[in-house]
Image (cartoon, grey):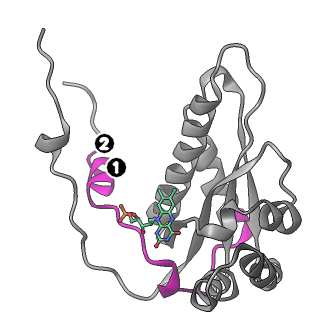
């Protein structure tokens, strides 16, 4: 039998995000967050291209981004409700890590694989935060896909995109379990 890590497996079988709107201060300090980012960056990455990077958004930066939501939403024709919801995502947050997909030119590794790796970084970051006892939530929202918002607000370059806005904080309530996939319905066993 291979060596097992029952605690790690139990974590993976029961892990659950905590909705961003239920997260509060305190948030992890920089050293603690560094460990979470280190775990997140320990992610499969074809060709060792490191086609991703982190932007840690602290309270004042989040307030600045919240202010940027309204002009972007107005330009895009968003409703007052959509703008307020998106503004609140930043105004009410205490700590967000933007995981930036930053694909590089490679003759060997297709860009889509580099994007998959960025998504894997997001899940690793989420799981590392949860395993450290923090509440965490992987969000996006329309603003995170708006070029003006990400280039003006986050300084992204033209080839970069936001893979995830990872909210981290102290959880105030554990959400109920949500329905999980029926493994038999999504799995084919190919014997020959
Ligand atoms: C790429 C991506 C973007 C997401 N963006 C949002 C979002 O903007 N708003 C939202 O309510 N949930 C969003 N979600 C879903 C949340 O992360 C949700 O809490 C998650 O599905 C719960 O998963 P878990 O219970 O397995 O941890 C997103 C998920 C992914 C993978």
Question: Residue at the location (57% across, 30% down)?
Answer: 113
Question: Residue at the location (75% across, 65% down)?
Answer: 56
**In the rendered image of this protein, does residue 80 appear above or below residue 123?**
below
Q: Is residue 20 magenta?
A: yes
Q: Residues within 10 Å of mark 1 (few under 14, many from 20)?
A: few
Quadrant into which the N terminus falls: top left
Question: Residue at the location (63% across, 78% down)?
Answer: 27
Q: Is residue 93 left or right of residue 132?
A: right
Q: Residues within 10 Å of mark 2 (few under 14, many from 20)?
A: few
The x and y percentages for residue 181 are 21, 53
Depth check: 118 or 86 in front? 86
Q: Quadrant of residue 55?
A: bottom right
The x and y percentages for residue 8 are 34, 49
Ligand 1 lies in quarter: bottom left
The x and y percentages for residue 53 are 74, 48
Range covered by the magenta-colored residues: 5-31
**Residue holding disc 1:** 8
Q: Is residue 161 magenta?
A: no
- The reply to whether the C-beta atoms of the residues labelled 2 and 1 are less than 8 Å apart is yes
The kind of secondary structure element at disc 1 is: helix
């Amino acid at each position: 039998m291979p060596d097992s890590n029952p605690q790690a497996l139990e974590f993976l079988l029961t892990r659950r995000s905590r909705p961003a709107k239920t997260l509060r201060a305190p948030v992890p300090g920089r050293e603690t967050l560094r460990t979470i980012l280190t775990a997140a960056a320990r992610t499969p990455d074809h060709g060792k291209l490191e086609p991703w990077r982190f932007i840690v958004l602290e309270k004042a930066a989040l307030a600045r981004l919240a202010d940027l939501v309204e002009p972007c939403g107005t330009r895009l024709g968003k409703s007052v409700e959509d703008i307020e919801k998106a503004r609140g995502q930043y105004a009410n947050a205490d700590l967000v890590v933007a995981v930036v997909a930053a694909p590089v030119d490679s003759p060997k590794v297709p860009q889509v694989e580099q994007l998959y790796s960025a998504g894997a970084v997001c899940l690793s970051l989420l799981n590392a935060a949860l395993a450290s006892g923090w509440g965490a939530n992987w969000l996006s929202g329309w603003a995170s896909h708006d070029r003006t918002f990400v280039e003006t607000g986050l300084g992204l370059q033209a080839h970069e995109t936001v893979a995830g806005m990872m909210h981290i904080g102290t959880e105030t309530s554990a959400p109920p379990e949500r329905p999980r996939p029926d493994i038999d319905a999504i799995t084919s066993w190919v014997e020959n």
